[in-house]
Image (tube, helix red, strand yellow):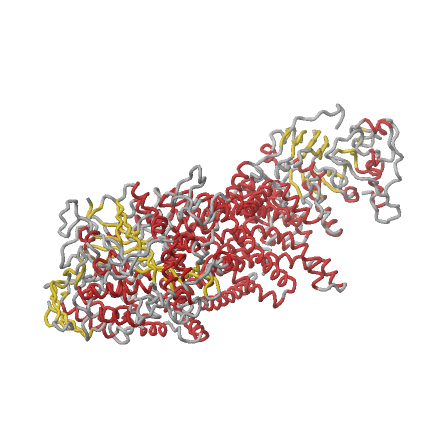
Amino acid sequence: MSLIEVRDLNVWFTLPGGRELHAVRGVGFDLDAGERFGLVGESGCGKTTTILAMMGLLPPNASVAGEVRLAGTNILAGGEDTVRPHRWTDLAMVFQGAMNALNPVCTVGAQIAEPILLHRESSAAAARKRAGELLELVGIPAGSAARYPHEFSGGMRQRAAIAMALACEPKALLADEPTTALDVMVQAQILDLLVRLSDELGLALVLVTHDLPVVAQICQRAGVMYAGEIVETAAIDDLFHATRHPYTRLLFAATPDLYGDEQVVSIPGAPPRLDEPVTGCPFRPRCDSVIGRCERERPLLRLAGGDGSGAAHAVACHRDDAGGSGAPRAAMGAGGTP
Amino acid sequence: MRGGDYVIRRVGFALLTIFVAITINFFLFRVLPGTVVTDLARVPHATPQLRHALTVQFGLDKPKWEQYLIYLRELARGNMGISFATQQPVSQLLLNDLKNTIPMVTIGTLGAIVVGIATGILSAWRRGSVSDHLSTNLAIAFYAFPTQFLGLMLLILLGGLLPTSGMENPYAGVFGTQSTVARLQDIGLHLILPALTLLLTLYGEFTLIMRSSMLETLGEDYVLTARAKGLTDRRVIARHAVRNALLPIATLVALSIGWIVGGAILVEYIFSWPGIGQALWQAINQRDYPMLQGGFLILAISVVVVNLLADLAYFKLDPRISG
Amino acid sequence: MSAIATEAGLAGTVPRGRAGLIRQAITERKAAALGLGIIVFFIILAVAAPLIVPYSTTARSCAVFAPPSASHWLGCDDGGIDMLSEIISGGQISLIIGFAATLIAMLIGGGVGIASGYFGRWLDIMLMRITDYLLVIPDLAFAMVIADVWGPSLSHVIAVIAILEWATTARIIRAQVMSVKERVYIKRARSIGAGHARIIGRHILPQVGPLLMANTVLTVAVAIYLETALAFLGLEDPSTTTWGTILEHAFDRAAVSAGAWWAIVPDGLVITLLIMGCFLLGQAIEDALNPRLRVAHLSSRRWALRPLAGRGPDAI
Amino acid sequence: MRLRTRRIRMALAAPLALATAAAVASCSASGAGSGSSGGVLHIGTTYPIDSMNPFVAQSDYSYAVYEYVYPQLVQYNARLGIAPDFARSWSVSPDGKSWTFHTVPHARWSDGTPLTAADVAWTINEVMKYKNGPAGQWAGLLEHMTGATAPNPTTVVIRYSTPVANVLAQMQSMSVLPRQVWAPYFTGKGSGLKTFPNQPPANGKPMVSGGPFELVRYKANQYALFKRNPNWWGPKPKIEGFGLQFFSNADAMVQALKDGQVDFVGEYTPPTAVAALKKAGFAVTTTPSISMKTFIINTNPHKTTHRELLDPRVREAIEYATDRSQIIKTAWLGLAAPGSTIIAPADGSWHDSGIKALPFDLAKANALLNAAGYKMGPNGMRIAGGHPMSYNVIFPPDERGTGDRTFQIMQSDLAKIGISISQQNMDDSATFNAISHDSYRTFDMAMWDWVPPVDPDFMLSVVTCAQLGNNSDSGYCNSAYDRMYAKQSTLISTSARRALIGQMQRYLYAAKPYIILDYPDIIEAHSPKWTGFVVAPVMGSVNSLSTQTLLQVHQS
């Protein structure tokens, strides 16, 4: 049994007009201690909603189904009250907009010490000392605990957010596009930091991003999401080199690599509206290898014919059930391999 | 100190505004047709000598500019002249009146702020619920009530239960012993209706502003972070949302001080509260320039001071302002 | 908007241009529709006043403080004049004062706001000191003196209210103009040689227009409020019948002691209703113009739980 | 409700005489009625005591307080005749130029210092020195006076340059000041006279008093509390003390009466509250007063505009179109008497009952105007001197409330005879300014009122040429009338003076500078638990005419 098991997670949003938007449609994956799992997909595919749903951080007009089992027990069973104790103690989160993820009118140190005081320590001094250590851990001088978020640079603010996430030694860190808002140099430092922390502290990491090279660089396994569900999941090498789902393949083709020797191909059309029912495979309108069944039947995520090289490789595509698979594209350019 | 020049600049602006207030005040009252001497008209056998004596005594015979310079010189010495009507030094009278107005206005305003902020937070947190609609519409209704109408209604409805005029029942102290505690209680009782009227006409604005400011703050990412940290709703609101939502309230209080004073005048008029509003009202009737100028000056200074305090409070509350 | 909102597609259909925004604000929010309804009702009442007024407002038609009866639904006031007719025709003049004063306040306030916001420097400092003074002075006390100086005729009351109210408008418009002025397309327009008048006309006014509209409606509420306060303190011409003078007559002739609630309550409620109407509408337009109202992350209502949806046996 | 201190203080300087006995309540001086003594009478008023300094105060309740705090030589009895007070008896020299008063022996001030005739002489002589300066407010009391001497502790002799008719009335309203308190202020330029607050010292001791009560606590514009003066030389008052509380509006005052916060409400009880108060079981007394509401028409011969108003037929027509009974019914709810001459009937024998006001007769008014040649022009207005007969009526705030309704009635009636009037509102100062502008040559009409003292001298003086720019609000100036006025002020014998005053009233009624609209009643209300009120035609029971009420009032 792995550290975190997400089973058939569904999220609906009731819109003001009364219509319902099915943002997450039966997502499931497992996460072991120290493992780094990437969740990839275009914006609006439900990846952020998924990790927010795991911590119950949804707005009032949302409704959730499915299970998030932590050491066997489903923390979403009783709604907000059962999930709250697990927040920051078991699952912690780092948000994308580092600029205002920190409270502008409180010092950084105080914001880091706050969860420690809440869940762990009783004395403020101990919490403050721990906050200083955490800042040092993420490469920020402990002295700057007394300064305010607007006095930090983008990178420092994200480091502080990470330090805050580690305040109560969580089992898993859910990172929502942690580096998207940062420039490339700072991005690399943050990613190294995440990898180092994951290895040293055995911290499980779920990295939500639309940036494939980043996933390739630091994740061991990844799942590709489209229109609210995982369409393909595999170990990082299989995903890049033994791509089975047409969307994944097209996604790689749409990502310019460092040396630019490949012709960048954009995927025509747009993801389907999540507030309307979908018949058949959601990717069908944009897929380049449509077969008869795609029209009628919605493909389910099934274990593909594994090539026996380790972690399971699952895909939700009718072509795959038929034994053959779309011609895998040539291996990614040099930048793609870890 | 952080933003030292910010404070100096704000104080500078405040002083400039007060000076403008003094000048405009002075000439504003000289525009009134008729002077206090004409007001003495129809005093039986007020001999022409008396009228002349009064004109000279109040310096009404000198050209306006000279009067203005005299007025500035006297003001620098803290002497606001003597009231034409009662011949007593204006500063003493006005400070006395201010002493009566301040408790009533402070309690009414603070009450309004507290009630306004509390209902604002509650209805923001319970957005869309019945209690939200109820408290918002009630706030708008009370805010829309003309102060004098509200005062009259309270006078009619609570007239029997609570004292409806004056600041205290003076008899107890004179015709029998009355401990200071009993006297304070008595004043407290007399305070309820005027302060309540002021509270009800003012709190609505604070509720609405606080509600929209809270709604905006609750949409900020750091609220999500706070919730993610496992804080209960109450703690998230108290620790993170309210502090940020309070910023616009500080400026609103400053802006509405002029409105509060207007309300105080009406409330004092209805409940015979012997405050500065009442004094201003009588001064206008008796064409009592020194009292009018003094009263306006005190009101202008108090408004400017409150504005300054609000600026400084805002500056202190929000570290982002470098000043 | 935070990540969730975009994903949840809550933005809905974005209305075309600012005017559409206001129309949407009114249709969307019940309160705004109610506010607009109240205002329109009173305007119609004022326009139709001469036709539907049951009794004359100057001639006596019943006993002093006669209680409400079949012939006089709202009884009579201290001069034996029918209360209902007074309120209907009183509304006519109160509205005229309210709208006229607001119009003047908007013109002056808007002008000063745009001028000081757009041209800035010394003009800005000078104009702002005057506005500071007007904001600093308690408006009712100021109005008392001015109305006393000029004598309590109708036009003086309008002028007094206009003088007091343009300062707040100027302040708001100035802030908006200064933010708009910094926008890129204004700088670009100036760089291609557009004259000040053109820039103000083409770019700044459309931006400022809706905000001015919202502020106008709120100022009407304040103008009516001030009118009644001035009348109550006896600074309005008692021979004209307005909602304010009705209350003043009642108060002057001790209606409360005479137990004549009908001389006070209906008039007070009518004033409150109109002010509420203006306020609801103004507030709604302001909300519509203020797109930053996000989805709240925190609310007393919680997200709901649903039973597990059916999935294939071997699905992960 | 406007602050009306100014118009009332006329009651101050000139002599006062009480109205006929009819108005007086039953209780006689000796206090035969039973009922417990003691208790504190709580009085409510809408006129604040603006100052305790008699050289500054203008509110009539201030003068009522001086009546009870300082001694006066004489006072009025229930029949408005002059009765002994601090002076036991008095006599006048044959040439009428010197008056001798014999004062109460062994009297003492509240602080124990002896109160003798010397105090009276001292007060008169000191005020004489400053009457053209700070003590100007008392100038009227000391007219034609040359000085006073006190040959012995119980005799004071006051000498005049010419015989003066109303010496007794003047002495009634002149308070004797305690020398031990006021002496330091009657020095140098006397500027201290006006700035001395004359209030109880901070240490809580009462203010030095020579009357039945002493002022114990005073807060400007709030309240004044009085206790019995232990050392008072006159009959002991039944009540232990009384308090005057100020209300900013009539509703608050009536509400306080209903709540029991106040026992007695005098003078300006609103007529509209009378019915409700009676229903609630309160004792409401109404009595004719000598105050009057006037409709002023400019009679100044040098008038620049609308000279048709100088035509007596026009003024007569306007009086015919004045519906006094409707005004009394609507504006005063019946609590007023129809007006006629400037000396009110409630003023007793001075009123000339021979003068009958013109009845309300629109036909006669139209006939008069047609006869005078003022044809009816377009939109219902007659034409005079080439322009429509439409006039501005200057309207002071004192007239708000009842005055508004009176104006509306006159406006609609005058319209029926082709004259249109419009209300021109302004405050007190501006009103006098507008009337006296350009020496009374520009104003057409005005509405104002008078609350004169009981003695007719003041009311008659208001229309003399000497008062132009001072007390005159009509601009009327006629040398024949002035000669009559000067003569009456020297007639010692009341019967001769009464005859001349009657002739003056008839003369004025014909000239019609004023149309006297009505004489509003005094309206008072008090809780049934109190009795013994002596109502007077000026200010009602608590007045500046005598100390009777507060000596006799007690809980029944």
Left-right relation of C283 to D112: right
A311 to A159, vertically: above or below: above
Q: Where, by quadrant of the figure, is residue D392 drawn?
A: bottom left
Quadrant (top left/top right/bottom left/bottom right) for the C terminus of chain C: top right
Residue closest to the eye, B98 or D338: D338
Measured as percent of width and height from the top left, residue A138 is found at 66, 48
A90 to A158, vertically: above or below: above
Measured as percent of width and height from the top left, residue A319 is found at 86, 29
Q: Is residue A305 visible?
A: no
A66 to C121, vertically: above or below: above
The number of numbered discs placed on residues in the rendered structure image is: 0
Left-right relation of D252 to C84: left
Left-right relation of C119 to B301: right
C65 to C226, vertically: above or below: above
Residue closest to the eye, C268 or A193: C268
Q: Where, by quadrant of the figure, is residue C112 drawn?
A: bottom right
Left-right relation of C270 to A226: left
Measured as percent of width and height from the top left, residue A125 is found at 53, 47
Measured as percent of width and height from the top left, residue D154 is found at 10, 67
Residue closest to the eye, D51 or A320: D51
Q: Is residue D248 visible?
A: yes
Quadrant (top left/top right/bottom left/bottom right) for the N terminus of chain C: top right
- Residue found farthest to the front: D371
Residue closest to the eye, D358 or D24: D358
- Residue found farthest to the top: C313
